[in-house]
Image: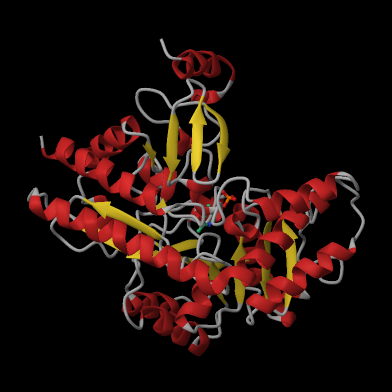
Amino acid sequence: MSKSQKLFNDSKKVIPSGVNSPVRYFEPYPFFTKKSNGSYIWDEDNKKYIDFCNGYGALLLGHRRKEVLDAVLKQLTQGTLFCTPTHSEIELSKLIIGNFPSIEKVRLVNTGGEATMTAIRLARGFTKKKKIIKFEGCYHGAHDSVLVKAGSGSAHNGISVSDGGLDEVAKNSLVVPYNNSEELEKVITKNKDVAGVIIEPVLANMGLILPEKNFLSQVRKITKDNDVPLIFDEVVTGFRVSPGGAQQHFGIKPDITTLAKALGNGFVVAAVGGKKEIMNLLSPGGKVYQASTYAGNPVSVSAAISSIKTINKIKNKLYSKLEQYNSTLTRAIGDMACDLKIPHQINSTSSMFQIFFTDKPVTDYVSSKNADANKFKKMFSTLLKKGVFIAPSQFEVVFLSDAHTKSDIKYTINAYDIALKSVKN
Ligand SMILES: *Cc1c(COP(=O)(O)O)cnc(C)c1O
C-alpha cells in the first residue's frame, strides 16, 4: 500500500471524506503532498508531478516564488497579526487600485468566497434591493446566495442547491445561462428587485468557457441601463488574464470587483473593491457590515504586495510566455486528439485551458455538462500516472504558471498523447 493510500485511510477517520475541500477527492484516493517547488509537487511516496492545478490558479508565479517568500520571511521577523492598521495595507490597496482603475477603494478579506459575499451585501445595501442575478455554472464561493447552479465542486458532485442552504435565500438568486445576454435583459427588466449581477468574466469553473464576442459589453450595457451594479468576480482572472484582470483585457468597467487566488500567490488573501460611493457603505462608516480578525494580516499582505510588484515588473515577458506555452500545449493536444479521431473541444485563453470530449462547442453550463466526463476522468488518471497533475475534475481548468519550463511543456505533451490514447481504448 502506498503512503498516500495509508494516509487517506487515516484521514477519513478524522476529516469528512478525508479532504478539506471537495474537489481534492478523487478515485480511488488522492495523493498526499509532501512539498512543492517551482512547477513541481512531490507526494508522500516521493513521486514528482508537474503541477497544472497550481492552487486552482493561485500560483501564477509558481510554487515558493523567491520574491514572495523573501517578503513573507521578512515580515515573519516583524510579527504575524496585529489587528491594527498597518502602512503595508495602504501600499497593497494602492497597488490594487493602480492595476484595476475601476477600483477606487478596496477592503482586504481572506478568501474569494468572503469577497463575493461582501460584494453581494454591498450591492444589496447600495440598491436597497434583494435579488441577485448569477450565471449558470459560475462559481463564486461556498455561501448560500451563490451556491445555486454553481460550477466547480458543486457541479462535479451534482449539487444544484446545497442541503442546509435556505430556499428563501436561493429564491433570491436568479440564474441566467452564460453567454446569453438576451435572457439577462429579459430577467432584469421583468424583476424590479434586482440588487446586482455577478459574473465570472471568463468562466473558469465549468471547465473553461470564454465569453462570446460582445457578451460582456452587453452585460455591462444592460446593467447600466437598468441601474444595477455589476460585480466582476475576478478571483481567477485577476492578475492571470492580464495585470488588470479580465476587465483590462476586455476593456469593461464593473462597479465592484472581487480578487483572491493569484493576488497572494499561495497566501491567504482576497479583496473586494469598487466605486467609492459603494465601498464607503462598509462599516464602521456605513451600514453594510463586514469584518474579519485576519483581514489585512501582515503576512498575507506582504505576500500580495510582492506578488503584484513581481507581476508588474515582469509583465512584458510573463503574459506572452504563458500564452505561448499555452498555445503550444493546446495545439499539440488538439492535433493528437484529431489524429486519434477523438471528438473534442479545447477552450483556451491566456494561461488556462480545458479539453472537453464532445463534438459540440462548449459555451455554457449545459454544453459543458454534456461532454463525456468519464473520458476526462480516464485522461486525468493516465496523466497522473505519468506525473502530470491537473485539477481532478472536468469542471476545473488547467493552469500554467511562470515556473513552467519548455521541457515541462514537452513532457506534458507526451503525457497527454498517452492519456488521449487511454481515452480512445
Ligand atoms: C475559487 C473561486 C472563488 C472562491 O474563492 P475561495 O478562496 O475558495 O473562497 C470565488 N470565485 C471564483 C471565480 C473562484 O474561482
**Above-or-below relation of 188 to 137:** below
| Residue 35 visible from this viewpoint | yes
Image location (x, y in percent) of residue 153? 43, 43
266 or 255, which is in the foreground?
A: 266
The quarter of the picture where the N terminus appears is: top left
> Seen from this angle, which residue lies furthest top?
1
Height in image: 33 above or below 294? above
- Residue 232 coordinates in the image, percent (x, y): 53, 70
Question: Residue at (40%, 59%) from the top-left corner?
Answer: 352
- Residue 18 placed where, x, y %? 51, 23
407 vs 35, left or right, is: left
Q: How many marks?
A: 0
Asked whether 221 or 407 is in front, the reply is: 407
The foreground one among 124 and 139 is 139
> Left or right: where does residue 409 sit relative to residue 345?
right
Residue farthest to the bottom? 225
Q: Nearer the viewer, residue 158 or 420?
A: 420
Whether residue 350 can be seen here: no
Q: How is the image coloured?
A: secondary structure
Percent position of residue 328, x then y: 30, 61
Residue at the spot 57% in from the left edge and 23% down from the top edge: 15
Residue 164, relative to residue 312: is it above or below?
above
Position of the C terminus, as image quadrant, is: top left
- Identified at 56% across, 79% down, the residue is 254
66 sits to left or right of 236: right
